[in-house]
Amino acid sequence: VDRLLEIYPDYASRFRVVFYGPQPYEVDVRAHKAMRHPHLVSFEPAVDYLESLAIMQAADALILIDGLFTQADDGIADNPFFPGKLTDYLGARRPIVGITMRSGPTAEVLTAARHMVADDRIDRIAFCLKRTIDGKNNPDYEASHPYQCMVVNAQMESVFRSAIAGAAP
């Protein structure tokens, strides 16, 4: 947020970032206090699942922060995780800025659906936020079809039926 406003100071009135969830970690509280524009970022208490879905659908855009690892520190070159929240975000049909590793399921899914993807470079994050604020994060919501509930449910049902059929004497 601070880097975005350092480059584009006139954007200060054009956005606000709200995080929902349990109490933020101490490192996040310290970072928030050190910000030049802390009034644009807030931490709200956790909400129940259905309320979270309504908040997602009402948002102008969503930010998904995924695991950021390094080969040097963690021995991980590609993010191995697919966060469940990504499926909820895709279902909300809102533009997403994914802050994740360049390679891995999150980056692949977001890129395929033409959402904005940033890694841990501050300037890249600021660029993706600016493009989203400018209305230039225009995803292909149909690319998310394979992750829709009814599609996944049908696949799971097929797997269960195959397992049951295979277990029969």
Image (cartoon, rainbow, N blue to C red):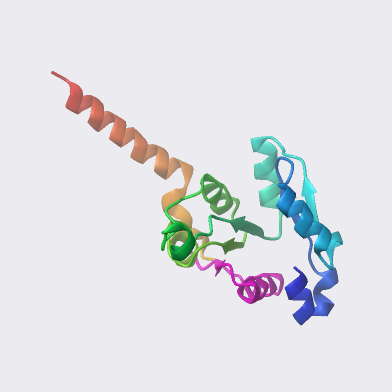
> Along the line of sight, which residue is nearer the eye, 137 or 124?
124
In this rendering, the answer to whether 161 lies above or below 88 is above
Q: Quadrant of the N terminus?
A: bottom right
Image coordinates for residue 10, horizontal then vertical, percent? 83, 78
Image coordinates for residue 54, horizontal then vertical, percent? 69, 44
Residue reaching furthest to the top: 169
- Queried whether the magenta region covers residue 118, the answer comes back as yes
Image coordinates for residue 31, horizontal then vertical, percent? 76, 59
In the picture, measured across the screen, residue 125 lies left or right of residue 38, that is left
Which residue: 68% across, 42% down? 52
Q: Quadrant of residue 97?
A: bottom right
Which residue: 73% across, 74% down? 3
Q: Quadrant of residue 2?
A: bottom right
In this rendering, the answer to whether 3 lies above or below 24 is below
Which residue: 45% across, 51% down? 81
* Residues shaded magenta: 113-138
Residue reaching furthest to the left: 169
Which residue: 50% across, 62% down? 110
Image coordinates for residue 142, horizontal then vertical, percent? 48, 59
